[in-house]
Image: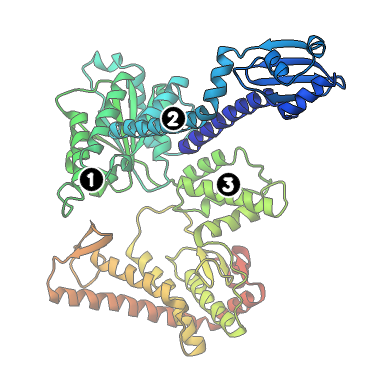
Amino acid sequence: MKTLKNLIIIVVIFLALAAFFSLYQNNNKTVKEIGISDFVAKVRNGEVTQVTVKDSSLEFTTADNEKFTTKKETADSLAELLKNYDVPADKIKDLKVEVKTDSGLSGWLGILLPSLIPLLFIIGFFWLMARQVQGMNNRAMGFGQDTASAEDDKKNKKDKKPKTTFKDVAGAKEAKQELVEVVEFLSNPKKFTEVGAKIPRGVLLVGPAGTGKTLLAKAVSGEAGVPFFNVSGSEFVEMFVGVGASRVRSLFQKAKKNAPCIIFIDELDAIGRQRGAGLGGSHDEREQTLNQILVEMDGFETNAGVVILAATNRPDVLDSALLRPGRFDRRVVVDLPDMNDRVEILKVHAQNKPLNKDVDLHRVAERTPGFSGADLANLLNEAAILTAKRNKKKISLDEVLESIEKVMLGPERRSRVLNEKEKKITAYHEAGHALLAHKLPNADPVHKVSIISRGTAGGYTFKVPSEDKHMHTRSYFIDELSVLLAGHASEKTVFGEVTTGATSDLKRATNLARSLVTEFGMSEKLPPRTFGDREELIFLGREISEQRDYSEKTAQAIDKEVDNLIINAYAKSCDIIKTEKVMLDKIANALLEKETLEKEEFEAIVGKK
């Protein structure tokens, strides 16, 4: 952008000089030039009425009011010239003669201007290039300066009180209560210092992506009415060792000048990973940056009035030195919202959206377990987009419910046309899932069954728990295994063979069965302990490794127990499908006819759960 701007300046200067030079030339431009003999002949014939002598140029006007110019020798005067050509004296006396001399400026411009314009153009070009190189040098010298904090500093000068407050953050009641103390300290630090209390220097916001950690940090700044410096952990990481540490120092220096204030570091795990975990020198820059942050937070100097907030969804990979008292000594968990919180979040995001009377946000919240605040915002936005595409003025419940499935599974793929055989297989596959979910007492109730493709799924069975669950029993997981394998069992029972449509179900069932044995301690034949230590390695990509803490004999026992869980769950699925074959046929036929069954239509076939 700057190069383009400089180029435009050069072009404008060139055009201005060219226009000036053109104007000068036009002012000196004659109408018609003739030879000296023709001039003398016109004087002899009495046609010339006025002559203007200008150095070696003669400009004259005839009786017909025509203007001409001619050249003479510089040393000869006009009178001598005419006498030399034997012009009668009476003809010379009748001439009106005017002598003009060029001014100093005009003379010099006439001499220098033709060569001066290219020279000025070249000088201007090199001057602009020199300025650009100087700017690059200045940026190079400021390589270690914190650019993000400088931008925020400008914003803080215009607006010292960000508008985001706790009222804009729905749900997260416990997290907000923890952060109220930070707000009170920044607003009234004397209240705490009088009783010898110290506010936590660092507050770490921990939670899944999209739960509102950044929004909470902005709300703290808004409530306290103090400057808010927002940076991302990745902004400190550069190719050269020491740059990140320099930026950390720059950031904290600016924070001290604006104290009391808040520094918010998003994605702290980008620089706060466990030291010594990397191979080679590629991680030295990250470690030096982390060391500088540790020193700034609790080193020899105290940063009074500067509170550091940080957010991460990977607290397990952070260096232990970051989490010790004196640094991030308070951890605030921002978890996924429960049903009541989801209702409040939906109300916030629905404020500027025209909702139809049939939209019940409680019903929407019931259908969205596990959704984060960002997911819910995206859900209502998708519903608004869908409403606009359908040329409606208000968002109805149909658009909201369809958007839930779009967010979870992807958009409908009606262009993916199945032949009659594939459509029938898909119908029985999904009917098997729905039937087992309805019959097994610990499985979640069915809310919708469809054989319309969404995303990578050929069809789907939408199950939603009747209430939010934070802990699950072994019987729940055993029934869930049977539901996952029901599609495979239904295909095998009805058609005598299976298709690749059950691949995803089999993978999920295998992972669940292995987790029951190795993580949850829910095996009946193995002791209640965990097996294997999983850790994440970040080197040349992301890799999950598992360190075995058990023998080969135990590994065989684990595999056997996993197989038994899957075999028993599959046998239960087959038994129920064979026993309830008539009901299975009814569900499949209804799907073939309507393609989609809502909860009410499904329960009209199978009855209440």
Q: Quadrant of residue 522?
A: bottom left
Task: Please name the amino acid that badge 3 sits on.
Answer: Leu
The answer to whether 340 is drawn above or below residue 76 in the figure is: below
The answer to whether 161 is drawn above or below residue 536 in the figure is: above
Residue position for label 2: 123
Query: Which residue appears at 12% of the width and 72% of the height?
Result: 551
Q: CA distance from mark 3 to mark 2?
A: 69 Å
The one nearer the camera, 267 or 469, is 267
Q: CA distance from mark 2 to mark 1?
A: 56 Å
Q: Position of residue 37 (x, y in %)?
A: 74, 27
Task: Please name the amino acid that badge 1 sits on.
Answer: Leu
Residue position for label 3: 361
Is any atom of residue 177 visible in this view? no
Q: Quadrant of residue 348?
A: top right
Query: Which residue appears at 42% of the width and 24% of the height?
Result: 154
Residue position for label 1: 318
